[in-house]
């Protein structure tokens, strides 16, 4: 995690790319202050690495902490709020644009 936290942020990005293979993309995300991210084209997982926060996904809100795993389907609004000063999470993007077909969170 120390190396991920030290990774440079590319211009215009809020997270650092750590690994890419095929459709899999692993990033390190450590927002400070506020989380201004937008909806993403692909499905994603968050694995909270350090700290705690409130996680908002669609109309849901949940307290999250290190070790929690969160799923966000492609196209769904989401963000972290009330983050502890040390908050950081792994972000895993995968699959095609528009997300996987069988998605229990999104009506098709």
Image: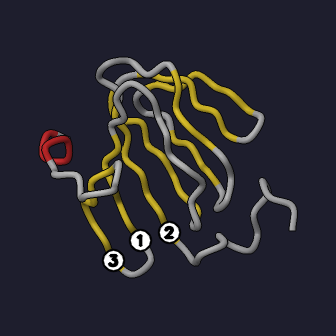
Q: Quadrant of residue 97?
A: bottom right
Left or right of 75, for residue 14: left
Q: Residue at x 42, y 36 (%)?
A: 48
Crowd around label 2: few <14 · some 14–19 · many ≥20 (10 Å) = many
Q: Residue at x 33, y 77 (%)?
A: 21
Residue picked out by circle 1: 24
Q: Is residue 108 above or below residue 10?
A: below
Residue picked out by circle 2: 94
Crowd around label 1: few <14 · some 14–19 · many ≥20 (10 Å) = few
Left or right of 26, for residue 40: right
Secondary structure at badge 2 equals: strand
Secondary structure at badge 1 equals: strand
Query: Tag on residue 82?
Result: none
Mark 3 and mark 2 lie on one chain; the one further toward the N terminus is: 3
Left or right of 63, for residue 84: left
Q: What whole-number distance in Å separates the C-alpha atoms at marks 3 and 1?
A: 5 Å
Q: Nearer the viewer, residue 41 or 21?
A: 41
CB contact under 8 Å: marks 1 and 2: yes
Q: Residue at x 87, y 68 (%)?
A: 108
Q: What whole-number distance in Å separates the C-alpha atoms at marks 1 and 2?
A: 5 Å
Residue picked out by circle 3: 21
Measured as percent of width and height from the top left, residue 90 is found at 37, 47
Crowd around label 3: few <14 · some 14–19 · many ≥20 (10 Å) = few
Q: What whole-number distance in Å separates the C-alpha atoms at marks 3 and 2?
A: 10 Å
Q: Residue furthest bottom?
A: 22
Measured as percent of width and height from the top left, residue 49 is found at 34, 35
Secondary structure at badge 3 equals: strand
CB contact under 8 Å: marks 3 and 1: yes
Q: Quadrant of residue 103?
A: bottom right
């Amino acid at each position: 995690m120390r190396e991920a936290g030290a990774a440079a942020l590319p211009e215009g990005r809020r997270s650092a790319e750590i690994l890419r293979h095929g459709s899999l993309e692993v990033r390190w995300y450590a927002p400070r202050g506020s989380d201004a991210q937008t909806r993403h084209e692909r499905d994603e997982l968050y694995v909270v690495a350090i700290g705690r926060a409130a996680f908002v996904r669609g109309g849901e809100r949940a307290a999250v902490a290190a070790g929690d795993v969160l799923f966000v389907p492609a196209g769904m609004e989401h963000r972290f709020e009330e983050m502890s000063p040390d908050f950081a999470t792994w972000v895993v993007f995968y699959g095609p644009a528009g997300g996987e077909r069988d998605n229990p969170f999104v009506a098709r």
